[in-house]
Image (spheres, helix red, strand yellow):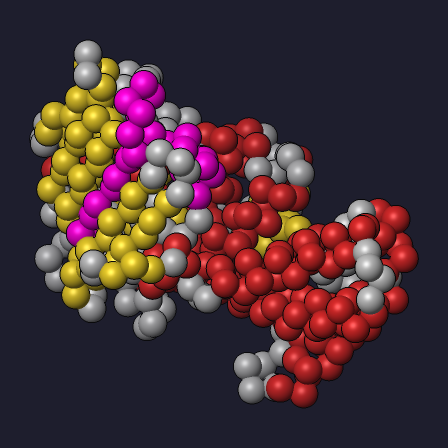
Amino acid sequence: MSEPLPPNGRATLFVSRLAVSQFRSHAQTRLALDGRPVALHGPNGSGKTNLLEAVSLLSPGRGLRRAKAEELARSGVGAGWRVRAEVATPRGARAVALTGEPEGRRRVEIDDKAETQTALGEVAPMLWLTPAMDRLWIEGPEGRRRWLDRAALSFFPGHAEASLAYERAMRERNRLLRDGPNDPRWLDALEARMAEHGLAVARARDAAAARLRGAFENAKTLFPLAEIAIVGGMGSGLEKGARAAPGDGAQASGAMDDFRAALARSRREDAAAGRALTGPHRADLSAVFAPKGVDARLCSTGEQKALLISLTLANARALAADATAGAAPILLLDEVAAHLDPDRRAALYDEIDALGAQAWMTAAEPGLFDALGGRAQRFAMSDGPDGSVLEPCDA
């Protein structure tokens, strides 16, 4: 595999302690972890995915289910929820506390100081795969953009701020075009912000895609290699700016000017459509199953799943090799092993082991983790009268 194990054979970036209170099916759940992968098994409805969701909130955004804060509280309790974690990183331990208030607000604290959600990206880079993503290649482009943005965010924590700023400016421009007043100076200012932040979004995505392509080169893996590209939505000249070298300020400036001019020209069309018709919010991610030269959307269900796993592992390899990241990301793999044959299942565990990643994995049957042996901390989950029950059962 592409990366050696850390000196102690375990992850150097991992959740070392987790405490979850009044969250989904979990009344009070506590875990102490040592950097090995975490294998959770139990029947459907026992709270396995809920626990992965709690961990996913340690990264920017709304987590792997994209739920609102008020939807995360334990049903019938009427109180808020809390997720607290200690995260071991190559640069030292960090403490993270997330609180969901009954009225729907969410608070973030890092090392006992109030922070924004985007600040979480500096603590624990995180990637995930869920069963809901199995249709990524055959549904609309929104899910693929979201996947690409998660990949970009793993490399560039500032990508979240640029994306939010772009979306805010675009929404305000859409509203102004729809409702007025038709103030050219106000529109000019909003379009300048869209151009600035849109270029930042495009450049981060393009750089992330380049790193993923690099991680496929010479990779020793049983999972299929993918040929990926960012397509569409960038006809304003952003492609040229996105691919400009970091020091090429003139080319980036020219791309911003081109995008701003394109937005100004399309005001009438955008007003009629009710939305901006060009920009990074219209981009898409394409992938080709390299061994067969087949577009991902035309592949079999099993091949599409294998491509997703392959891209996730490539993302993790690229991060592990990134000097600024300093470690493989935390992986959340919900029901990932159930649809793999034994050889690929063992290969997945070997690649996680070689990466030195803390992977949180779920399965209904404990036997699906047999190939892990003692390389993982195992926990059995069940649905008790007072919510989810978790019991350690290390091999």
110 to 274, vertically: above or below: below
100 to 175, vertically: above or below: above
- Check the picture and name the quadrant holding the C terminus: top left
Quadrant in the rendering for residue 294: top right
In depth, the one of 256 and 338 nearer the eye is: 256
State the count of labels: 0
In depth, the one of 348 and 33 nearer the eye is: 33
Residue at screen point 15% across, 49% down:
16
In depth, the one of 95 and 331 nearer the eye is: 95
Furthest toward the front, the residue is 181
Residue at screen point 39% across, 55% down:
117
Q: Residue 293: where, in percent of width, then height?
A: 64, 46
Highlighted range, magenta: 62-87
Queried whether the magenta region covers residue 247, the answer comes back as no
Q: Can I make out residue 336 in this image?
A: no
Quadrant in the rendering for residue 237: bottom right
167 to 101, vertically: above or below: below
Q: Is residue 118 left or right of residue 254?
A: left
Q: Residue 20: where, in percent of width, then height?
A: 22, 36
- Check the picture and name the quadrant holding the N terminus: bottom left
Q: Can I make out residue 256 in this image?
A: yes
Residue at screen point 21% across, 26% down:
27
Furthest toward the top, the residue is 385
Q: Residue 288: where, in percent of width, then height?
A: 62, 47
Residue at screen point 62% across, 61% down:
166
Queried whether the magenta region covers residue 78, the answer comes back as yes
Q: In this view, does 16 lie to the left or right of 252?
A: left
368 to 211, vertically: above or below: above
Classified by dominant secondary structure, the portion drawn in magenta counts as loop
